[in-house]
């Protein structure tokens, strides 16, 4: 009996692997109606916006990630200790996003800032295309287009050149694969396992992928009825394979547990992206949630308890932390697409000029890429890049200890200056973040003690920082630069 069950399980997995092979995916990618055109238009739109929107570069972490990637390429080794700061120099630091940082460094080295934008534009295009194509399996073209637009609008806040955007296509492919398996009442394809192996080395959101696989596996088991054993075996094998793929990282178990340890940092609430969504202003994500709620209530949509809990959990994550909006914007539509499809007539008329439209979209994307590379892109002063302020500091002073604004840390690393602090929360820890918060509260005694302890010679701070006024009044310190984005102080040689 066991042998017979094993043979059946093997034949089932073999048949599934044939069904989920790349040839089948290619045939599904080009349906004979408007759905493929809508998906390719979504990819084109996401590519164009990401390639030409300056907002994508408005994050100081971009500089740090490029510098980390350049360092790893030069050393031919992954970073396990901090090589950048002077307050935590040599301390253990896991470059858990090492693959994304190397990709960023390569693209920046090949094409400068334009090359970096093209890397992230390609990632955004793939994510948008996969999302829209998967929605098109269940929804008619109009509903597919509206859902895609709402999802892309909800991502706008987090459209930044950071590893999470490179992980977005993997998130979309992973969830689309899980949902496809559930719709066919089979276990997910093993073709998804390489996705997990890449994902774990790009961004910590891979842990959500593992959680979703477990939840949808439980849903499959609950709905399997008397034939629960093959369902359990199939999802257990896939789950074991997913964990094995997640272990394919330089840190092994620590690499899998890293996102949990990071979220356990109590000082994260001081950082903007970890703060709650600001509901006092219009948010595209709220409009998308309202539209979803309207359809569910007016069309009588029915979802399984597991999927309902998943959607509520994703909504909670997006409301609690702004950084999770982009994850919810991908995951919620994909998880809700099949139940929503029951409320729409998914039949659609063939589109005779489909191939011509797809060819035009591909040509347009190629032209946009060429234009992006041809147009020179230089960085100017911004709230995360105090370029002119740093240029005002004499070269001999730059190599001495600095007190910097939290948002300037990434740029200082990129410019070869060792910062006092930067955005690597996992490196500095709660204690250091609390000390920095105390410095920022304009406490003269705390500031004076920190300047003496670290032998700080100069500072580069945001004009709105309370520390600027304290340094103005502190004996032996004087301003050498004042601008709209930064203020620089230098300590006199005779000062304590």
Image (cartoon, rainbow, N blue to C red):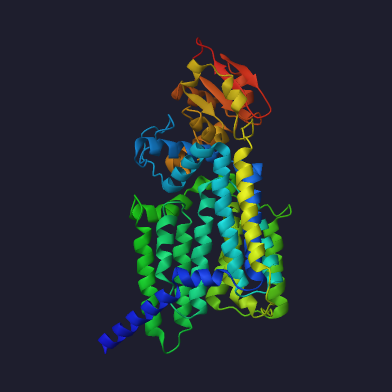
Q: Where residue 324 sits: x, y (%)?
A: 57, 56
The answer to whether any part of residue 195 appears in the image is: yes
Q: Nearer the viewer, residue 61 or 438?
A: 61
Q: Where residue 212 sits: x, y (%)?
A: 48, 67
Q: Nearer the viewer, residue 357 or 166?
A: 357
Q: Where residue 37 sits: x, y (%)?
A: 65, 65
Q: Nearer the viewer, residue 396 or 198?
A: 198
Residue shown at 60% from the left, 59% from the top? 128
The answer to which image quadrant residue 233 occupies is bottom left
Image quadrant containing the N terminus: bottom left
- 101 up-or-down from 133: above or below: above
The answer to whether any part of residue 46 appears in the image is: no
Q: Where residue 118 sits: x, y (%)?
A: 57, 46
How many numbered discs sit on the rendered protein? 0
Task: Using residue 71 as the reference point, say whether residue 422 is left or right of it.
Answer: right
Residue shown at 66% from the left, 60% from the top? 41
Residue shown at 59% from the left, 40% from the top? 373
Q: Residue furthest top?
A: 494
Q: Nearer the viewer, residue 101 or 348?
A: 348
The answer to which image quadrant residue 270 occupies is top right
The answer to which image quadrant residue 411 occupies is top right
């Amino acid at each position: 009996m066991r042998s017979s069950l094993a043979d059946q399980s093997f034949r089932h997995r073999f048949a599934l692997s044939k069904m989920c092979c790349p040839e089948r995916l290619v045939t599904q990618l080009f349906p004979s109606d408007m759905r493929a055109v809508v998906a390719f238009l979504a990819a084109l739109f996401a590519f164009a916006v990401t390639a030409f929107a300056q907002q994508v570069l408005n994050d100081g972490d971009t500089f740090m990630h490029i510098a980390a990637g350049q360092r790893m390429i030069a050393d031919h080794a992954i970073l396990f200790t901090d090589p950048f700061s002077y307050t935590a120099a040599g301390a253990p630091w896991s470059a858990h996003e090492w693959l994304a940082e190397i990709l960023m460094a390569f693209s920046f080295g090949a094409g400068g800032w334009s090359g970096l934008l093209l890397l992230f534009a390609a990632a955004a295009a793939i994510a948008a295309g996969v999302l829209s194509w998967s929605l098109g399996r269940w929804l008619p073209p109009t509903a597919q287009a509206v859902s895609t637009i709402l999802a892309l609008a909800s991502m706008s806040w987090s459209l930044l050149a950071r590893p999470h955007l490179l992980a977005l296509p993997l998130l979309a492919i992973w969830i689309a694969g899980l949902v496809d398996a559930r719709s066919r009442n089979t276990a997910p394809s093993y073709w998804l396992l390489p996705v997990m192996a890449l994902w774990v080395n790009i961004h910590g959101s891979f842990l959500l992928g593992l959680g979703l696989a477990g939840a949808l596996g439980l849903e499959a088991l609950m709905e399997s009825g008397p034939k629960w054993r093959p369902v359990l075996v199939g999802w257990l094998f896939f789950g074991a394979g997913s964990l094995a793929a997640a272990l394919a990282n330089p840190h092994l178990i620590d690499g899998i547990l890293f996102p949990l340890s990071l979220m356990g940092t109590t000082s994260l609430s001081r950082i903007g992206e970890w703060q709650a969504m600001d509901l006092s202003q219009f948010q595209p994500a709220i409009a998308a949630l309202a539209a979803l709620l309207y359809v569910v209530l007016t069309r009588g949509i029915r979802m399984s308890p597991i999927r309902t809990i998943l959607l509520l959990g994703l909504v909670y994550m997006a409301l609690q932390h702004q950084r999770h909006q982009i994850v919810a914007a991908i995951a919620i539509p994909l998880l809700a697409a099949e139940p929503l499809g029951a409320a729409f007539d998914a039949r659609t008329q063939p589109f005779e000029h489909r191939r011509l439209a797809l060819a035009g979209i591909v040509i347009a994307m190629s032209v946009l890429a060429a234009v992006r590379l041809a147009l020179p892109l230089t960085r100017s002063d911004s709230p995360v890049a105090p370029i002119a302020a740093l240029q005002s500091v004499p070269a001999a002073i730059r190599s001495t200890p600095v007190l910097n604004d939290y948002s300037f840390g990434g740029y200082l690393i990129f410019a070869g200056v060792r910062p006092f602090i930067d955005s690597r929360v996992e490196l500095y820890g709660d204690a250091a973040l609390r000390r920095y918060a105390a410095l920022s509260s304009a406490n003269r005694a705390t500031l004076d003690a920190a300047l003496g302890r670290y032998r700080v010679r100069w500072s580069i701070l945001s004009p709105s920082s309370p520390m600027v006024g304290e340094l103005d009044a502190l004996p032996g310190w004087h301003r050498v630069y004042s601008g709209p984005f930064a203020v620089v102080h230098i300590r006199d040689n005779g000062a304590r």
